Amino acid sequence: MLLNDVHSPQDLKALSVVELQDLARQLREHIVDQVSKTGGHLAPGLGVVELTLALHFVYNSPSDKIVWDVGHQAYAHKLLTGRVDYFKTLRQFHGMSGFPKRSESEHDAFGVGHASTSISAALGLAVGRDHLKQSHAVVAVIGDGSMTGGMVFEALNNAGATKSITIILNDNKMSIAPNVGNFSRYLNRLISDPTYNRMREDWHGLLQKLPGTIGRRVEDIMGRAETVAKSVLKPGRLFEDLGARYFGPIDGHNIPELIEFLTRVRTMPGVNLVHVLTEKGRGLRIAEQDPYKWHGAAPFDVESGASSAPPTAQPALTTVFGKAMLELARKDAKIVGITGAMPSGCGLNILEKELPHQVFDVGIAEGHAVTFAAGLACAGMLPVVAIYSTFLQRAYDQMIHDVALQHLKVVFVLDRAGLVGADGPTHHGSFDLSYLRTIPEMTILAPSDETELRDMLHYALYGCEGPVAIRFPRGNAYSAEIRPGFVPITSNSFKVIEEGRDVLLLGAGFMLAELRKTSEILKQNGFNPTLADARFIKPLNVSGYQDLLSRHSTVVTLEDNALPGGFGAAIAEFIGDQEIQTRLLRYGLPDAFVEHGEIKQLYQELGIDGESVAVKVLKYLSDRR
Ligand SMILES: Cc1ncc(C[n+]2csc(CCOP(=O)(O)OP(=O)(O)O)c2C)c(N)n1
């Protein structure tokens, strides 16, 4: 059967194992072909092709609910649920989302992008089903990396609330980077325990001896499976103690074995956890060899693995941050970096390589990362918590209660602030200025280029008291050459770049580059703008802003944060509080979730690129001339 002819999971039901195996090959071809053109998550999805086929063979989506964790591995699921044609628009502007999305398909039971949500969400779906006296099955599929998120254990603790739920633990020993921590070690012990493996073989042998499916009484099978399961409970002791029935580990690339297990588990009451072993990147040699590198991919050549994008001389801003951390940490052993399972994503791999004892990868555990940093600060260390803007949302109370309230010096480095592009609304860093601004004592810095980023890190560590956040977008430095050394920054100082008088253009962070364009267009149209780099989003320099704002009858702010609570809102509050007579035009992200697409396209659509802002400001100024 051709993948193109699979319009819904129902089309799989009559297929033989050989046909399913052939579909697995086609799914891999489709995924590799598409990701090589558009970029996207690669190795995670290749690892779950057989598991996805088996799930859709056994379960009846959409009435049965399959909940994916993170959702970056769900391309095969999308392809098997009537989206083969749409898949060609993967991650493109106005095209298919890279993650399961409820509005995209009835088969996407729960929207996702952040890790460790699946068991909680599935539990909600299951308890709702129980209350409404429905009988469909609910399955959560979660990776071993995502199991490091604390919410998973909160959900397991609560899982007895439902009559029946199945959790598939997709264990490929990897988070994005190799998985870390005691839980990961525990899973490894399960897999390598010889006593267990012997028992497992016995169990499998016994299952083979069971009579054929036809005419088999379900209770009988369940009874036997239960008996056998009891004999292998020891390896899954942790899950057992948490109230789940543990099955496995089973080979996640063996379709008949998967189907056999899932068929038995599907109708079982209680909390059932099936431990499935998969290989991340399976079927694509380069990804199998280096699943870390191929977790996500930019467009690439399938044969060589070479990136299709032209090489850039300018380093990524994360690299600039990572190198600055290394320079500072070499001289000060108190400086430590903390990452939530993203050492290379956030640049701390650079520090880790040379000074491994000064980096802590705590797993996908942002809340823990922040409170852990608070403890380190109490112990006299200088912790730098490097977490993407969107994932730090997870740790809001920890920032308030554990850090700020205790006046602790913890430095937060928020990469991917603003729009991130193809990953879309689950990953855009749209809200950090809003959520950080409300925290008392929090200093918030927004560098407008790589040099400021370095200087601000130095300032955050040594130049000011209390918690500090530095936020910068996804992207590269402007220059290939990074200025060495660190130049001190004056507290609360903004920087006037061009003095004018008609209008004040105030840029937050890297959006200054867009305002530079606005400024040029205004000048070409006979206006004389002032251009300034805010640098400090909080606190604002009271006397400096009183003077700057009252000298201009029109003020324009531009930011890549949501307008509610963002930088423009801070200036609006200031103008109101200080009773300054000026008109304020605020530009930034709307009070809405922004879809995926190239950042440039999104700016244009939202009217926040330099040219669009110029058009709006010109109209405003011309109307009032
Ligand atoms: C809250 C949160 N933090 C970090 C991430 C970034 N992230 C995406 S996938 C991933 C690793 C997930 O590992 P696992 O669940 O084992 O899936 P695998 O990629 O190995 O299939 C991480 C850390 C995220 N999506 N959500």
Image (spheres, rainbow, N blue to C red):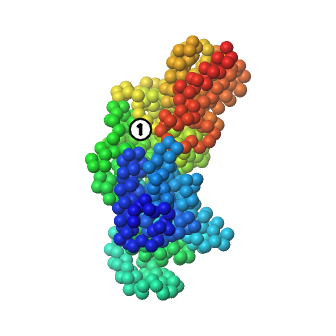
The quarter of the image holding the C terminus is top right
Image coordinates for residue 269, horizontal then vertical, percent: 56, 76
Q: Residues within 10 Å of mark 1 (few under 14, many from 20)?
A: many
- Judge from the rendering whether residue 129 lies leftward or rightward of residue 90; answer left or right: right
Examine the rendered structure and indicate whether residue 173 appears above or below residue 562: below
- Name the element at disc 1: helix
Count up the numbered dots: 1
Rendered position, 182 above or below 496:
below
Q: Residue at x 53, y 66 (%)?
A: 61
Quadrant of the rendered image containing residue 179: bottom left
Say which of 79 and 164 sits in front.
Answer: 79
Q: Quarter holding the N terminus? A: bottom left
Left/right placement of residue 202 relative to residue 581 reads: left
Q: Position of residue 167 (x, y in %)?
A: 50, 67
**Residue 378 shows in this picture:** no
Q: Residue at x 50, y 49 (%)?
A: 97
Q: Which residue is mark 1?
A: 318
Give the quarter of the image for residue 437. Answer: top right
Percent x, y of residue 137:
56, 70
Residue 566 placement, left or right of 187: right
Question: Is residue 448 visible in the rendered structure shown here?
Answer: yes
Q: Residue at x 64, y 26 (%)?
A: 585
Viewer-nearest residue: 45 or 337: 45
Cβ of mark 1 under 8 Å from ligand 1: the answer is no
Residue shown at the point (29%, 52%) measured from the top left? 286
Q: Amino acid at mark 1?
A: Thr
Residue 397 position within the rendered picture, expressed as x and y whole percent measured from the top left: 60, 48
- Outermost residue, left direction? 304
Query: For residue 289, which quarter of the picture?
Result: bottom left
